[in-house]
Every structure is written in C-alpha cells, then in structure tokens.
Image: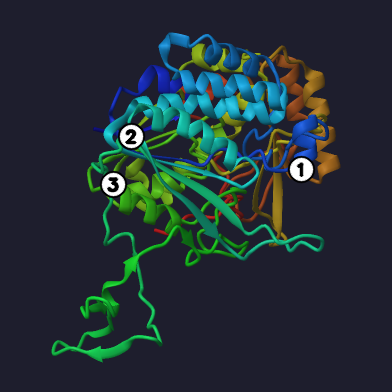
Amino acid sequence: MVNQLFYGDNLEVLRRHIKDESVDLCYIDPPFNSKRNYNQIYNNIGKEDQAQAQAFIDTWTWDDYANQGLAEILENYQGKFTSQSIDLIAGLTKVLSKGSLLAYLIHITLRVVEIHRVLKPTGSFYLHCDPTASHYLKLILDAIFCTQEGDFQNEIIWCYSIGGKSKNKFGKKHDVILFYTKSNRDTHTFNQQAAAIPRKANSHMKVGIDSDGRQYQEKMDKKTQKVYRYYLDEGKIAEDYWIDIETLNRDDRERLGYPTQKPEALLERIIKVSSNEGDIVLDAYCGGGTTVAVSQHLNRYWISIDLTYQSISLTLKRLENAFGKSIIDEIKLNGIPEDMESVITLANKKDDRTRKEFEKWTVLTYTNNRATINAKKGADRGIDGIVYFQGDKDEPEKIILQVKSGNVKAGDIRDLQGTITLEQAAIGIFITLKEPTKEMIKTAKTAGIYQSRYMSQSCDKIQIVTIQEILEEKKRLEIRLSFEVLKSAEK
C-alpha cells in the first residue's frame, strides 16, 4: 500500500480509482452551503455562497452538473442507488425546487454512494457539516447506509467559541459531524481508550485513593446495594458533544492560511477511535490536508482527493515541512500534469469549476508551492500569482506572475510592465504555454534589470518562462523568498 494524493474531481476518482471495500475509515469535510437563510433556501433567491472562494469553489448553483447528477440518481445509474435514496431526492426536488441547496445535496449523494461502496464491511464514515443542511444530509445518509445493513452511530456536536458574535440571535458556535458504519453488527473499529476524555470529580460521589495511589470515586446503587468505582485516570468515553477541542484562531501555530482548516486534535480523535495503525483512511475533500497530516503522523495509510491545485500544493508543502522533503517521494501523485499533452488538456478545459486550474498549477509549480493565487473573479489586473522576497530596504518586495495559455505577443509584455508599475512590484514573470516571439523577448529586455544586495547576481525585471521549461527542464523560481505566503507546518 502506498499513500495517494489525487488531483481531480473526487466523483471521477472514486469511480475510477478506488476499489470496492478497500477503505477502513472515511472522513469528509465538504464545502458547506451555509451562507443562506431558510427563506433564501426555499425561494432560491439571494447571492450564491462565495465564501472561501480563494481556496476552493464553494458556490452551489443549479447547472449542467446538477442536472446530470439528478438524472443519474433518478435513473439509478449503474444500479448504484437505493430505492429510498432515489425517492428521497425525487421528493426533495419537489420541496426545494432546482436551486442551490438541491445542487449541494445531489453533489453529496453522488459521492456518498461511492464512499459506501469503497468502505470495508467493518468501515466507518464521518461527514462534517453545519446545521444549515445537516438534517437533509442525515436523511441522505440514512437512505444510503441504513437501508444496506449499515447503522447511524452518532450525531456529534463539535462546539467552539472563537469567531464573531451575533447581536440578534444566539451565536452559531458548533458544527455537526454525522457518524455512520457500514455494518449494524458492531464489527466496526471503536477504540474506547482513544475515545476517552478526563473524568471530572463529582461532588456527589465518595472520593478515595487506593493502595496504588490512584484516585477514584465511588457510588452505591440504592436498589442493588452494589458499589461502583470509577478511576479518574481512566477517563470516560466522550459524549456526543465535544467541547474540549477549540477551532483554530488567526494566530494558532497550526494555522496554514487555509480558510476552513480544522484542528489536528479533531482529526486525531476520529482517526484514533475509528482506525488502527496500518489501516487506510480516505478524505475525498483534501482541503488544507489536516486528515492527511494526522494520518501520516498516526501511521495510517491515506488516500486524499481535491479538485483544486491549491489544496494539492498546500498539502504537499505541509507534509514536506512536517516530515521532511523525502516524504514526497513516498507519495503516489495522480492527475498532476507530467507532460505537455496533459498540460494542454488542463489549459483547454471548459469546465467552469476548473477554469483557473491551469494558472494555479503553473504558478504553484514554478514557485515550489510558495505563491499566493489571485483568485478574484473578473478583472485580475493581469496577476495570477504573487510572491514576496527580501528587498534592499529590508521590506518585502513583490513579484507578480502572469500565465497565458493562448497566443502571445509583445503587447502582453508591455501590459505586464504597466501592471508592475501600478502594483509597485519589483519583478514580473510571464509564463507562456506557447513559445514567445522574438519581439516579446526584446520588449522584456527593455524593462531593465533588478539588483539587490541579497542576490548573488542581477536578474531581468521582466522574465519570460515557458511551460516546456517548467516541465522538461524543471525550471523554478530561484529567488530566495523571505516572506512565505503560507505558514509552515510544525515538524
């Protein structure tokens, strides 16, 4: 078994690459459909949820993908769907109509059906969501798991205090984690010791210390006169509300810059409780790579998937920082462009969900995963990525990166030069899929050179790099970057 990281649509990856009954534990933390009130949900009005758009697509709209997904469910594509899940989606279509929430629920249904397939008979599944849609999601999971000899185990309420406060309603300070097992025969892994939390002394119980110096509490059953003794150092199995794990704050040492990053302690509890060393853990929404990092630390094998290269890049960087550069050689990377043909395919994708992926892959690959991506929709002012380095004035200097997949000309270089001036950047790097013209190279040279006392030699103020050089010659940004965009994970 080798750890695997997939770059692509998790539905396609699950269907094509993950074998039946091969996974011990699956945890997913899909993008929430949470920025909508119930009036908006039922009437399908208001702006779509565009929160966290810089890191991944979290916009749920009724589109061709939703139509296709609905058709697959209602027509029982390849006999994958239970009659209950088909009837449920058909009913929700009438109740919710074709809008944002239904698109979200169809997206989840398609993937949970595949997750159920790949789970071992002894496997466990955790779905992390929020109260906006958790009640709908539980219906979907019931229709998939409980109708096929699976079982609902817990609705876990993860409570936290960090974040904004409400002035006109009770503060929203919890997420929901739905816990299911593929079997209802209690054959799933549940490590009680890993599920234990410290037992607090109870003022209504007798406290004592035994001959070994262990503190205990005792109580007597009035009916049976039997005495029950509880040792405080053994702890007790955690309840289904978790108040002992706080969400990450802005200054947390764990925080890497990913907007919905979950604390490692949360994943540690789930992975320790529901898997053993050597088991296989699946996360179909890689995100900031927390599941991957914790699984690696706990000696589990792992499989992770994400649609955006920013998540893939951050996960690789997180693993490298935490476990050393050699860890990358131990991972099987799937779906990442390795030749010109695959790069051209990525560049020519018409899928709205991946329209920026070519630029993201290019910028992050060339900068060794050190750039920040300009994910603003609409006019990006000719900037696809930014990195910072130490300037002569001991302040961060900016390098802007621009990526082009189509025809290029000298005017593109002049436009970049104007952007450099407007952005007060020191250097501009123009990355092109097609070969630059002689006039482009000449125009770039007229921009002059940049020299800093921190550089061993000067460099062109405007540099032209080709995708072919990045792929075949492994050309990378060689300027030392003192100001990393993303924080490094702790070793």
> Is the C-beta separation of discs 2 and 1 under 8 Å?
no
Q: What residue would you read off at disc 2?
A: 182
The residue sitting at the front extreme is 223
Secondary element under disc 2, as helix, strand or loop, is loop
Query: Is the C-beta separation of discs 2 and 3 under 8 Å?
Result: no
Circle nearer the viewer, 2 or 3: 2
Residue at (40%, 31%) from the top-left corner? 145
Residue 293 placement, left or right of 128: left
Q: Which mark is residue 37?
A: 1
Count of residue discs: 3
Q: Say whether residue 82 is left or right of residue 103.
A: left
Question: Which labelled disc corresponds to residue 275?
Answer: 3
- Tell me what residue is drawn at x 43 percent, y 22 percent: 13
* Residue in front for this viewpoint, 23 or 300: 23
x and y, in percent, of residue 354 in the image: 62, 23
Q: Position of residue 435 (x, y in %)?
A: 63, 14
Which badge, 1 or 3, is on the more N-terminal residue? Answer: 1
